[in-house]
Image (cartoon, grey):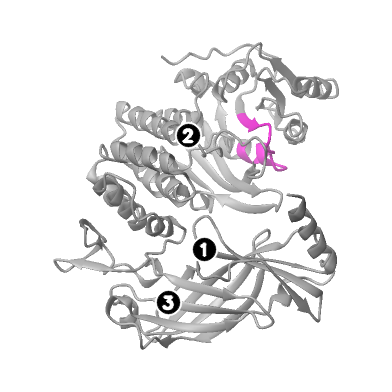
Amino acid sequence: MKEALEPRPGPTITPTAQVSIVVIAFNDAVHVRDAVRSALSQGDAVAEVIAVNDASTDGTGEALDALARTDPRLRVIHRDGNSGGCGTPRNDGVRAATGRFVMFLDSDDVLPPGAAEALLAAALRSGAPVAAGACVRRELPARRDVPWQPGLYREAAVHESAEASPQLVRDTLCVNKLYERTFLFAHGITFPEGRYTYEDFVFTARVLAAAPRIATIPDAVYIWHVRRSAARQSISLDRTDVANWQARIDAHRASVQIFQEAGHKALALAADTKFLDHDLRMYVRELHTRGGDYRTEWWRLTRDYLAGFDEAALRAARAPARWLARVVLASPTPRDLERLTQLAARPGRLLPPYAEANGHAVWSPDLPEVELDALGTKPMHRLPVTVDAEPAIGPRSTLRLRVHDLYGRLAAAGPVSIDIELRRRRDDRRGPVHTAALTADPAATGSETCWTAEVVLDLATLVERGSGHAADPEPWDLMAEVRCADGAGFRASLRAMGPGLRRRVLPSRRHGLLLAQPYATTGGALSLRVAAGLRSVWRIAARRFRR
Protein backbone atom coordinates (compact mmCIF):
# COMPACT_ATOMS: atom_id res chain seq x y z
CA MET A 1 0.00 0.00 0.00
CA LYS A 2 1.37 3.41 -1.03
CA GLU A 3 1.68 6.03 1.66
CA ALA A 4 -0.13 9.24 0.70
CA LEU A 5 1.73 12.52 0.73
CA GLU A 6 -0.04 15.51 2.19
CA PRO A 7 1.17 19.03 1.30
CA ARG A 8 2.08 21.21 4.24
CA PRO A 9 1.65 24.97 4.38
CA GLY A 10 4.86 26.95 4.39
CA PRO A 11 6.28 30.43 3.94
CA THR A 12 5.33 32.50 0.93
CA ILE A 13 7.38 31.48 -2.13
CA THR A 14 8.45 34.23 -4.50
CA PRO A 15 7.79 33.82 -8.25
CA THR A 16 11.51 33.12 -8.72
CA ALA A 17 12.26 30.88 -5.75
CA GLN A 18 10.01 27.89 -6.37
CA VAL A 19 12.27 24.87 -5.89
CA SER A 20 12.81 22.77 -2.76
CA ILE A 21 15.90 20.54 -2.93
CA VAL A 22 15.79 17.42 -0.76
CA VAL A 23 19.23 16.11 0.23
CA ILE A 24 19.38 12.71 1.93
CA ALA A 25 22.38 11.55 3.98
CA PHE A 26 23.49 8.61 6.07
CA ASN A 27 26.98 8.41 7.59
CA ASP A 28 28.49 10.62 4.90
CA ALA A 29 30.08 13.47 6.83
CA VAL A 30 32.99 13.52 4.35
CA HIS A 31 30.84 14.48 1.35
CA VAL A 32 27.56 15.92 2.61
CA ARG A 33 28.87 19.49 2.94
CA ASP A 34 29.77 19.62 -0.76
CA ALA A 35 26.34 18.27 -1.70
CA VAL A 36 24.43 20.79 0.41
CA ARG A 37 26.61 23.70 -0.69
CA SER A 38 26.01 22.79 -4.34
CA ALA A 39 22.27 22.94 -3.62
CA LEU A 40 22.45 26.24 -1.74
CA SER A 41 24.50 27.81 -4.53
CA GLN A 42 21.81 27.17 -7.15
CA GLY A 43 20.72 30.79 -6.96
CA ASP A 44 17.34 32.48 -6.94
CA ALA A 45 15.43 29.43 -8.22
CA VAL A 46 15.85 27.67 -4.87
CA ALA A 47 13.51 28.53 -2.02
CA GLU A 48 14.89 26.01 0.47
CA VAL A 49 17.16 23.03 0.92
CA ILE A 50 15.88 20.25 3.17
CA ALA A 51 18.54 17.86 4.43
CA VAL A 52 17.26 14.60 5.88
CA ASN A 53 19.75 12.91 8.19
CA ASP A 54 18.83 9.23 8.27
CA ALA A 55 20.05 8.58 11.85
CA SER A 56 23.75 8.94 11.05
CA THR A 57 26.35 8.09 13.68
CA ASP A 58 29.48 9.62 12.13
CA GLY A 59 28.94 13.36 12.57
CA THR A 60 26.79 13.88 9.48
CA GLY A 61 24.00 15.41 11.57
CA GLU A 62 26.37 17.81 13.32
CA ALA A 63 27.84 18.88 9.95
CA LEU A 64 24.35 19.63 8.63
CA ASP A 65 23.38 21.60 11.74
CA ALA A 66 26.53 23.70 11.40
CA LEU A 67 25.68 24.50 7.79
CA ALA A 68 22.11 25.39 8.75
CA ARG A 69 23.40 28.02 11.15
CA THR A 70 25.08 29.79 8.22
CA ASP A 71 22.17 29.79 5.76
CA PRO A 72 18.49 30.16 6.79
CA ARG A 73 17.36 28.37 3.59
CA LEU A 74 18.72 25.07 4.94
CA ARG A 75 16.43 23.02 7.16
CA VAL A 76 17.63 19.78 8.73
CA ILE A 77 15.40 16.83 9.62
CA HIS A 78 16.93 14.24 11.94
CA ARG A 79 15.34 10.81 11.78
CA ASP A 80 15.30 8.81 15.04
CA GLY A 81 16.08 5.49 13.34
CA ASN A 82 17.81 4.52 10.15
CA SER A 83 15.38 3.57 7.39
CA GLY A 84 17.76 1.23 5.59
CA GLY A 85 17.24 2.84 2.19
CA CYS A 86 16.79 6.06 0.25
CA GLY A 87 13.01 6.08 -0.18
CA THR A 88 11.87 6.92 3.35
CA PRO A 89 14.11 9.99 3.85
CA ARG A 90 13.13 11.29 0.42
CA ASN A 91 9.45 10.92 1.30
CA ASP A 92 10.12 12.78 4.56
CA GLY A 93 11.75 15.58 2.61
CA VAL A 94 8.88 15.92 0.15
CA ARG A 95 6.36 16.07 3.01
CA ALA A 96 8.36 18.85 4.66
CA ALA A 97 8.93 20.83 1.45
CA THR A 98 7.08 24.07 0.76
CA GLY A 99 8.27 24.89 -2.76
CA ARG A 100 6.09 24.43 -5.81
CA PHE A 101 8.67 22.03 -7.23
CA VAL A 102 11.01 19.51 -5.64
CA MET A 103 14.37 18.03 -6.64
CA PHE A 104 16.46 15.26 -5.07
CA LEU A 105 20.17 15.10 -4.29
CA ASP A 106 22.22 12.34 -2.67
CA SER A 107 24.85 13.30 -0.12
CA ASP A 108 27.80 11.97 -2.15
CA ASP A 109 26.83 13.79 -5.37
CA VAL A 110 26.55 17.44 -6.41
CA LEU A 111 24.40 19.71 -8.56
CA PRO A 112 26.27 21.67 -11.24
CA PRO A 113 25.74 25.45 -11.27
CA GLY A 114 22.44 26.49 -12.85
CA ALA A 115 20.81 23.03 -12.67
CA ALA A 116 17.72 24.11 -10.70
CA GLU A 117 17.25 27.25 -12.78
CA ALA A 118 17.46 25.31 -16.07
CA LEU A 119 14.94 22.70 -14.96
CA LEU A 120 12.57 25.27 -13.50
CA ALA A 121 12.67 27.34 -16.69
CA ALA A 122 11.89 24.25 -18.79
CA ALA A 123 8.95 23.28 -16.58
CA LEU A 124 7.45 26.78 -16.56
CA ARG A 125 8.02 27.33 -20.28
CA SER A 126 6.30 24.07 -21.26
CA GLY A 127 3.70 23.86 -18.52
CA ALA A 128 5.07 20.42 -17.66
CA PRO A 129 4.88 19.05 -14.10
CA VAL A 130 8.08 17.09 -14.73
CA ALA A 131 11.34 18.35 -16.23
CA ALA A 132 14.45 16.26 -16.79
CA GLY A 133 18.03 17.02 -17.78
CA ALA A 134 21.30 15.31 -18.51
CA CYS A 135 23.15 13.41 -15.79
CA VAL A 136 26.90 12.89 -15.82
CA ARG A 137 28.54 9.89 -14.11
CA ARG A 138 31.87 11.19 -12.82
CA GLU A 139 34.40 8.42 -12.13
CA LEU A 140 36.56 9.42 -9.17
CA PRO A 141 39.37 10.07 -8.54
CA ALA A 142 40.14 10.20 -12.29
CA ARG A 143 37.24 12.68 -12.86
CA ARG A 144 36.24 10.93 -16.04
CA ASP A 145 32.76 12.07 -17.09
CA VAL A 146 30.42 9.58 -18.76
CA PRO A 147 26.99 10.83 -19.88
CA TRP A 148 23.98 8.87 -18.61
CA GLN A 149 21.47 7.93 -21.32
CA PRO A 150 22.77 10.67 -23.66
CA GLY A 151 20.32 9.81 -26.44
CA LEU A 152 17.42 11.16 -24.37
CA TYR A 153 19.00 14.56 -23.80
CA ARG A 154 20.63 15.61 -27.08
CA GLU A 155 18.20 18.50 -27.54
CA ALA A 156 15.34 20.20 -25.76
CA ALA A 157 11.94 18.55 -26.23
CA VAL A 158 8.47 18.40 -24.73
CA HIS A 159 6.86 14.95 -24.50
CA GLU A 160 3.10 14.93 -24.09
CA SER A 161 3.41 11.67 -22.14
CA ALA A 162 5.78 8.74 -21.76
CA GLU A 163 3.30 6.62 -23.71
CA ALA A 164 4.06 8.82 -26.72
CA SER A 165 7.82 8.61 -26.00
CA PRO A 166 8.44 5.17 -24.44
CA GLN A 167 12.20 5.65 -24.70
CA LEU A 168 11.93 7.79 -21.55
CA VAL A 169 11.59 4.54 -19.59
CA ARG A 170 15.33 4.01 -20.07
CA ASP A 171 16.16 6.77 -17.59
CA THR A 172 15.23 5.31 -14.21
CA LEU A 173 17.00 8.01 -12.17
CA CYS A 174 14.96 10.34 -9.98
CA VAL A 175 17.75 12.82 -9.21
CA ASN A 176 18.12 14.52 -12.59
CA LYS A 177 14.52 15.70 -12.59
CA LEU A 178 12.23 18.39 -11.20
CA TYR A 179 8.72 17.47 -10.01
CA GLU A 180 5.70 19.64 -9.24
CA ARG A 181 4.62 18.70 -5.73
CA THR A 182 0.89 19.00 -6.43
CA PHE A 183 1.35 16.47 -9.25
CA LEU A 184 2.99 14.02 -6.83
CA PHE A 185 0.25 14.60 -4.22
CA ALA A 186 -2.60 14.22 -6.71
CA HIS A 187 -1.36 10.84 -7.91
CA GLY A 188 -0.11 9.56 -4.55
CA ILE A 189 3.40 9.13 -5.94
CA THR A 190 5.95 8.17 -3.30
CA PHE A 191 9.14 6.14 -3.00
CA PRO A 192 8.98 2.62 -1.54
CA GLU A 193 9.61 2.79 2.18
CA GLY A 194 12.40 1.09 4.13
CA ARG A 195 15.24 -0.93 2.66
CA TYR A 196 14.37 -0.99 -1.03
CA THR A 197 17.56 -1.07 -3.09
CA TYR A 198 16.31 0.33 -6.40
CA GLU A 199 13.59 2.62 -5.11
CA ASP A 200 14.05 5.09 -7.99
CA PHE A 201 12.91 2.41 -10.49
CA VAL A 202 9.53 2.22 -8.77
CA PHE A 203 9.20 5.97 -8.18
CA THR A 204 10.01 6.71 -11.83
CA ALA A 205 7.50 4.10 -13.02
CA ARG A 206 4.80 5.70 -10.86
CA VAL A 207 5.64 9.10 -12.33
CA LEU A 208 5.55 7.90 -15.93
CA ALA A 209 2.39 5.84 -15.39
CA ALA A 210 0.59 9.03 -14.33
CA ALA A 211 1.16 10.28 -17.91
CA PRO A 212 2.45 13.80 -17.21
CA ARG A 213 3.82 16.13 -19.85
CA ILE A 214 7.61 15.95 -19.56
CA ALA A 215 10.14 18.57 -20.65
CA THR A 216 13.69 17.39 -21.38
CA ILE A 217 16.73 19.61 -21.76
CA PRO A 218 20.34 18.95 -22.83
CA ASP A 219 21.80 20.88 -19.86
CA ALA A 220 23.80 18.88 -17.31
CA VAL A 221 21.71 19.04 -14.13
CA TYR A 222 23.26 16.32 -11.96
CA ILE A 223 26.77 14.98 -11.27
CA TRP A 224 26.67 11.39 -10.08
CA HIS A 225 29.91 10.57 -8.29
CA VAL A 226 31.13 7.01 -8.79
CA ARG A 227 33.76 5.98 -6.23
CA ARG A 228 34.52 2.35 -7.06
CA SER A 229 37.50 2.24 -4.70
CA ALA A 230 35.52 3.52 -1.70
CA ALA A 231 35.55 1.33 1.41
CA ARG A 232 31.73 1.47 1.56
CA GLN A 233 30.06 1.28 -1.84
CA SER A 234 26.76 2.96 -2.56
CA ILE A 235 23.74 0.68 -2.54
CA SER A 236 23.48 0.56 -6.34
CA LEU A 237 27.20 -0.02 -6.93
CA ASP A 238 27.56 -2.84 -4.41
CA ARG A 239 26.86 -5.71 -6.81
CA THR A 240 29.14 -8.32 -5.23
CA ASP A 241 26.25 -10.14 -3.55
CA VAL A 242 23.67 -11.90 -5.71
CA ALA A 243 21.00 -10.33 -3.48
CA ASN A 244 21.67 -7.10 -5.37
CA TRP A 245 20.59 -8.77 -8.62
CA GLN A 246 17.49 -10.15 -6.91
CA ALA A 247 16.67 -6.62 -5.70
CA ARG A 248 17.08 -5.27 -9.22
CA ILE A 249 14.78 -7.95 -10.61
CA ASP A 250 12.19 -7.18 -7.92
CA ALA A 251 12.30 -3.44 -8.67
CA HIS A 252 11.99 -4.05 -12.39
CA ARG A 253 9.11 -6.47 -11.89
CA ALA A 254 7.31 -3.88 -9.74
CA SER A 255 7.85 -1.20 -12.39
CA VAL A 256 6.42 -3.36 -15.17
CA GLN A 257 3.43 -4.20 -12.99
CA ILE A 258 2.79 -0.47 -12.41
CA PHE A 259 2.75 0.14 -16.18
CA GLN A 260 0.50 -2.86 -16.83
CA GLU A 261 -2.00 -1.89 -14.14
CA ALA A 262 -2.16 1.63 -15.58
CA GLY A 263 -2.86 0.20 -19.05
CA HIS A 264 0.46 1.31 -20.54
CA LYS A 265 1.47 -1.78 -22.52
CA ALA A 266 4.02 0.15 -24.58
CA LEU A 267 5.80 1.31 -21.41
CA ALA A 268 5.83 -2.22 -19.98
CA LEU A 269 7.41 -3.49 -23.20
CA ALA A 270 9.93 -0.64 -23.21
CA ALA A 271 10.86 -1.43 -19.59
CA ASP A 272 11.47 -5.10 -20.41
CA THR A 273 13.58 -4.11 -23.40
CA LYS A 274 15.61 -1.73 -21.25
CA PHE A 275 16.17 -4.50 -18.70
CA LEU A 276 17.68 -6.69 -21.41
CA ASP A 277 19.73 -3.99 -23.12
CA HIS A 278 21.10 -2.37 -19.96
CA ASP A 279 20.68 -4.40 -16.77
CA LEU A 280 21.27 -7.88 -18.19
CA ARG A 281 24.33 -6.82 -20.22
CA MET A 282 25.86 -5.01 -17.25
CA TYR A 283 25.62 -7.99 -14.92
CA VAL A 284 26.70 -10.53 -17.56
CA ARG A 285 29.76 -8.38 -18.23
CA GLU A 286 30.80 -8.86 -14.58
CA LEU A 287 29.74 -12.49 -14.23
CA HIS A 288 33.19 -13.96 -14.90
CA THR A 289 34.58 -12.03 -11.90
CA ARG A 290 32.21 -13.76 -9.45
CA GLY A 291 32.55 -17.04 -7.59
CA GLY A 292 30.92 -20.31 -8.57
CA ASP A 293 28.06 -20.08 -6.05
CA TYR A 294 27.21 -16.55 -7.23
CA ARG A 295 27.18 -17.61 -10.88
CA THR A 296 24.94 -20.60 -10.24
CA GLU A 297 22.40 -18.60 -8.24
CA TRP A 298 22.54 -15.62 -10.66
CA TRP A 299 21.91 -17.94 -13.59
CA ARG A 300 18.94 -19.57 -11.84
CA LEU A 301 17.37 -16.23 -10.89
CA THR A 302 17.87 -14.82 -14.37
CA ARG A 303 16.58 -17.88 -16.19
CA ASP A 304 13.45 -18.00 -14.04
CA TYR A 305 12.77 -14.31 -14.57
CA LEU A 306 13.43 -14.23 -18.32
CA ALA A 307 11.09 -17.18 -18.79
CA GLY A 308 8.21 -14.77 -18.13
CA PHE A 309 9.26 -12.25 -20.82
CA ASP A 310 7.15 -11.90 -23.93
CA GLU A 311 8.78 -12.79 -27.24
CA ALA A 312 8.09 -9.18 -28.32
CA ALA A 313 10.45 -7.89 -25.62
CA LEU A 314 13.23 -10.23 -26.73
CA ARG A 315 12.83 -9.19 -30.35
CA ALA A 316 12.75 -5.50 -29.44
CA ALA A 317 16.08 -5.74 -27.59
CA ARG A 318 19.35 -5.18 -29.40
CA ALA A 319 20.93 -8.31 -30.85
CA PRO A 320 23.68 -8.79 -28.22
CA ALA A 321 21.19 -8.61 -25.34
CA ARG A 322 18.70 -10.80 -27.18
CA TRP A 323 21.34 -13.49 -27.78
CA LEU A 324 22.50 -13.33 -24.15
CA ALA A 325 18.95 -13.86 -22.95
CA ARG A 326 18.41 -16.80 -25.29
CA VAL A 327 21.60 -18.53 -24.12
CA VAL A 328 20.55 -18.19 -20.48
CA LEU A 329 17.09 -19.52 -21.30
CA ALA A 330 18.50 -22.45 -23.29
CA SER A 331 21.04 -23.67 -20.74
CA PRO A 332 20.06 -24.83 -17.24
CA THR A 333 23.55 -24.07 -15.86
CA PRO A 334 26.17 -21.34 -16.44
CA ARG A 335 28.18 -21.81 -19.62
CA ASP A 336 30.35 -20.01 -22.20
CA LEU A 337 31.21 -17.25 -19.74
CA GLU A 338 34.06 -15.80 -21.81
CA ARG A 339 31.91 -15.58 -24.93
CA LEU A 340 29.03 -14.10 -22.93
CA THR A 341 31.31 -11.53 -21.26
CA GLN A 342 32.73 -10.38 -24.57
CA LEU A 343 29.29 -10.18 -26.18
CA ALA A 344 27.95 -8.15 -23.23
CA ALA A 345 30.74 -5.57 -23.64
CA ARG A 346 30.08 -2.23 -25.32
CA PRO A 347 30.55 -2.59 -28.21
CA GLY A 348 29.91 -6.33 -28.14
CA ARG A 349 32.33 -8.88 -29.56
CA LEU A 350 31.20 -12.32 -30.72
CA LEU A 351 34.12 -14.69 -30.25
CA PRO A 352 34.72 -17.61 -32.62
CA PRO A 353 34.01 -20.40 -33.35
CA TYR A 354 31.01 -19.56 -35.50
CA ALA A 355 28.49 -22.33 -35.98
CA GLU A 356 25.59 -22.88 -38.37
CA ALA A 357 22.55 -25.16 -38.24
CA ASN A 358 19.98 -25.58 -41.01
CA GLY A 359 21.49 -22.65 -42.85
CA HIS A 360 21.23 -20.27 -39.87
CA ALA A 361 23.93 -18.77 -37.69
CA VAL A 362 23.64 -20.23 -34.20
CA TRP A 363 25.37 -19.79 -30.85
CA SER A 364 26.94 -23.26 -30.86
CA PRO A 365 26.29 -26.74 -32.28
CA ASP A 366 24.85 -27.91 -28.96
CA LEU A 367 22.54 -24.87 -28.66
CA PRO A 368 21.11 -24.68 -32.21
CA GLU A 369 17.90 -23.12 -30.87
CA VAL A 370 19.82 -19.90 -30.08
CA GLU A 371 19.81 -18.30 -33.52
CA LEU A 372 22.04 -15.28 -34.14
CA ASP A 373 19.38 -13.50 -36.11
CA ALA A 374 19.81 -10.26 -38.08
CA LEU A 375 23.51 -10.81 -38.84
CA GLY A 376 22.79 -10.83 -42.54
CA THR A 377 20.92 -7.52 -42.49
CA LYS A 378 22.84 -5.53 -39.90
CA PRO A 379 25.00 -2.69 -41.25
CA MET A 380 28.72 -3.32 -40.92
CA HIS A 381 29.18 -0.84 -38.07
CA ARG A 382 26.60 -2.72 -35.95
CA LEU A 383 28.20 -6.15 -36.26
CA PRO A 384 29.83 -7.66 -33.11
CA VAL A 385 33.17 -8.19 -34.86
CA THR A 386 36.07 -9.43 -32.73
CA VAL A 387 39.45 -7.73 -33.04
CA ASP A 388 42.13 -9.42 -30.95
CA ALA A 389 45.11 -7.40 -29.76
CA GLU A 390 48.26 -8.93 -28.27
CA PRO A 391 50.54 -6.27 -26.77
CA ALA A 392 54.31 -6.66 -26.59
CA ILE A 393 55.73 -3.83 -24.48
CA GLY A 394 59.48 -3.23 -24.77
CA PRO A 395 62.04 -0.98 -26.46
CA ARG A 396 59.86 -1.38 -29.57
CA SER A 397 56.29 -1.66 -28.27
CA THR A 398 53.84 -3.29 -30.65
CA LEU A 399 50.30 -4.54 -30.98
CA ARG A 400 49.69 -7.70 -32.96
CA LEU A 401 46.16 -7.51 -34.33
CA ARG A 402 43.78 -10.14 -35.65
CA VAL A 403 40.39 -9.23 -37.18
CA HIS A 404 38.00 -12.18 -37.29
CA ASP A 405 35.48 -12.68 -40.05
CA LEU A 406 31.81 -13.04 -39.07
CA TYR A 407 29.87 -15.48 -41.23
CA GLY A 408 31.46 -14.12 -44.40
CA ARG A 409 30.32 -10.50 -43.93
CA LEU A 410 33.84 -9.08 -43.65
CA ALA A 411 35.24 -11.24 -46.45
CA ALA A 412 32.59 -9.83 -48.78
CA ALA A 413 33.53 -6.27 -47.82
CA GLY A 414 37.30 -6.85 -48.12
CA PRO A 415 39.14 -5.41 -45.07
CA VAL A 416 42.19 -3.41 -46.19
CA SER A 417 43.44 -1.31 -43.23
CA ILE A 418 43.06 -0.72 -39.51
CA ASP A 419 43.50 2.43 -37.42
CA ILE A 420 44.30 2.12 -33.71
CA GLU A 421 43.20 5.21 -31.80
CA LEU A 422 44.12 5.96 -28.17
CA ARG A 423 42.00 8.20 -25.94
CA ARG A 424 42.88 9.32 -22.45
CA ARG A 425 40.11 8.12 -20.19
CA ARG A 426 39.83 11.02 -17.74
CA ASP A 427 39.13 13.68 -20.36
CA ASP A 428 38.68 11.76 -23.65
CA ARG A 429 41.73 13.52 -25.11
CA ARG A 430 42.69 11.96 -28.41
CA GLY A 431 46.19 10.56 -28.58
CA PRO A 432 48.11 9.26 -31.57
CA VAL A 433 46.47 7.15 -34.28
CA HIS A 434 48.44 4.19 -35.64
CA THR A 435 47.56 2.81 -39.08
CA ALA A 436 48.51 -0.53 -40.63
CA ALA A 437 47.52 -2.60 -43.65
CA LEU A 438 45.48 -5.74 -43.05
CA THR A 439 46.68 -8.98 -44.61
CA ALA A 440 44.60 -12.13 -44.98
CA ASP A 441 45.96 -14.90 -42.78
CA PRO A 442 46.73 -17.81 -45.13
CA ALA A 443 46.61 -20.29 -42.24
CA ALA A 444 43.00 -19.42 -41.35
CA THR A 445 40.17 -21.09 -43.26
CA GLY A 446 36.39 -21.41 -43.18
CA SER A 447 34.77 -19.90 -40.11
CA GLU A 448 38.23 -18.94 -38.83
CA THR A 449 39.00 -16.54 -41.70
CA CYS A 450 40.85 -13.51 -40.35
CA TRP A 451 43.19 -10.64 -41.21
CA THR A 452 46.30 -9.62 -39.34
CA ALA A 453 48.38 -6.48 -38.84
CA GLU A 454 51.01 -5.09 -36.50
CA VAL A 455 51.35 -1.50 -35.28
CA VAL A 456 54.18 0.15 -33.36
CA LEU A 457 53.13 2.20 -30.31
CA ASP A 458 54.95 5.40 -29.38
CA LEU A 459 54.26 5.32 -25.65
CA ALA A 460 56.32 8.42 -24.87
CA THR A 461 53.77 10.60 -26.69
CA LEU A 462 51.08 9.54 -24.21
CA VAL A 463 52.76 11.44 -21.37
CA GLU A 464 52.55 15.23 -21.52
CA ARG A 465 55.65 17.23 -20.83
CA GLY A 466 55.68 18.49 -17.27
CA SER A 467 53.46 15.64 -16.03
CA GLY A 468 56.23 13.14 -15.38
CA HIS A 469 55.80 13.28 -11.61
CA ALA A 470 52.23 12.02 -11.54
CA ALA A 471 51.78 9.40 -8.85
CA ASP A 472 49.59 7.06 -10.88
CA PRO A 473 49.60 5.88 -14.50
CA GLU A 474 47.14 7.51 -16.89
CA PRO A 475 44.56 5.06 -18.31
CA TRP A 476 44.17 5.10 -22.10
CA ASP A 477 41.43 3.26 -24.00
CA LEU A 478 42.12 1.78 -27.41
CA MET A 479 39.68 1.58 -30.32
CA ALA A 480 40.06 0.09 -33.77
CA GLU A 481 38.58 1.38 -37.00
CA VAL A 482 38.60 -1.10 -39.87
CA ARG A 483 38.26 0.13 -43.45
CA CYS A 484 37.09 -2.13 -46.27
CA ALA A 485 37.55 -2.14 -50.04
CA ASP A 486 33.83 -1.65 -50.70
CA GLY A 487 33.79 1.59 -48.65
CA ALA A 488 32.29 0.04 -45.53
CA GLY A 489 33.91 0.31 -42.14
CA PHE A 490 33.33 -0.15 -38.45
CA ARG A 491 34.74 0.72 -35.04
CA ALA A 492 35.44 -1.87 -32.37
CA SER A 493 37.18 -2.12 -29.05
CA LEU A 494 40.15 -4.48 -28.84
CA ARG A 495 40.02 -7.82 -27.06
CA ALA A 496 43.02 -8.06 -24.72
CA MET A 497 45.06 -11.17 -25.46
CA GLY A 498 48.37 -12.88 -24.74
CA PRO A 499 51.08 -12.94 -22.08
CA GLY A 500 52.01 -9.27 -22.52
CA LEU A 501 49.31 -8.02 -20.11
CA ARG A 502 51.76 -7.03 -17.39
CA ARG A 503 53.63 -3.99 -16.09
CA ARG A 504 56.94 -3.01 -17.70
CA VAL A 505 59.49 -0.28 -16.88
CA LEU A 506 61.21 1.07 -20.00
CA PRO A 507 64.02 3.56 -20.66
CA SER A 508 62.88 6.74 -22.40
CA ARG A 509 64.94 9.51 -24.00
CA ARG A 510 62.18 12.03 -23.35
CA HIS A 511 61.17 11.06 -19.80
CA GLY A 512 64.03 8.98 -18.43
CA LEU A 513 61.76 6.10 -17.48
CA LEU A 514 58.34 4.94 -18.64
CA LEU A 515 56.03 2.61 -16.78
CA ALA A 516 53.51 0.89 -19.08
CA GLN A 517 50.85 -1.66 -18.22
CA PRO A 518 48.48 -3.15 -20.80
CA TYR A 519 45.46 -4.70 -19.08
CA ALA A 520 42.01 -6.12 -19.72
CA THR A 521 38.96 -4.20 -18.49
CA THR A 522 36.04 -5.98 -16.82
CA GLY A 523 34.49 -6.45 -20.25
CA GLY A 524 37.73 -7.85 -21.70
CA ALA A 525 38.76 -4.79 -23.72
CA LEU A 526 42.41 -3.73 -23.99
CA SER A 527 43.42 -0.58 -22.12
CA LEU A 528 46.81 0.85 -21.28
CA ARG A 529 48.21 2.68 -18.25
CA VAL A 530 51.28 4.88 -18.74
CA ALA A 531 53.35 6.93 -16.27
CA ALA A 532 56.71 8.65 -16.70
CA GLY A 533 59.67 9.69 -14.58
CA LEU A 534 61.76 8.03 -11.90
CA ARG A 535 59.65 9.53 -9.10
CA SER A 536 56.42 8.05 -10.45
CA VAL A 537 57.95 4.62 -10.95
CA TRP A 538 59.46 4.66 -7.44
CA ARG A 539 56.20 5.70 -5.75
CA ILE A 540 54.19 3.03 -7.56
CA ALA A 541 56.77 0.35 -6.73
CA ALA A 542 56.86 1.42 -3.07
CA ARG A 543 53.06 1.32 -2.80
CA ARG A 544 53.02 -2.17 -4.30
CA PHE A 545 55.73 -3.32 -1.86
CA ARG A 546 53.73 -2.02 1.13
CA ARG A 547 50.73 -4.10 0.05
Question: Mark 3 = which residue?
Answer: 403
Q: Residue at x 64, y 61 (%)?
A: 425
Among the two numbered marks 2 and 1 on one chain, the one whose residue lies closer to the N terminus: 2
Say which label, 1 or 3, has the lower sequence index: 3
* Closer-to-camera residue (358/179): 358
**Does residue 165 appear in this view?**
no
Q: Does residue 442 belong to the magenta stretch?
A: no
Q: Quadrant of the N terminus?
A: top left
Q: Quadrant of residue 62?
A: top right
Say few, some or many: other residues with alpha carbon within 10 Å of mark 3 (under 14 / 14 to 19 / 20 or more).
many
Mark 2 lies on residue: 244
Mark 1 to mark 3: distance in Å? 14 Å
Within the image, what quadrant is residue 230 found in? top right
- Label 1 sits on residue: 525
Position above or below: 76 against 362: above
Q: The magenta stretch spans which residues?
A: 103-119
* Pointer 2 or 3: first along the chain: 2
The Cα atoms of the two marked residues, 2 and 1, are separated by 25 Å
- Asked if residue 490 is positioned above or below residue 331 in the image, the reply reads below
Q: In the structure shown, which secondary structural element does the residue marked by tag 2 occupy?
A: helix
168 sits to left or right of 29: left
Q: CA distance from mark 2 to mark 3?
A: 37 Å
Q: Residue sitting at 41 percent across and 64 percent down?
A: 349
Labelled pair 2, 1 in contact (Cβ < 8 Å): no
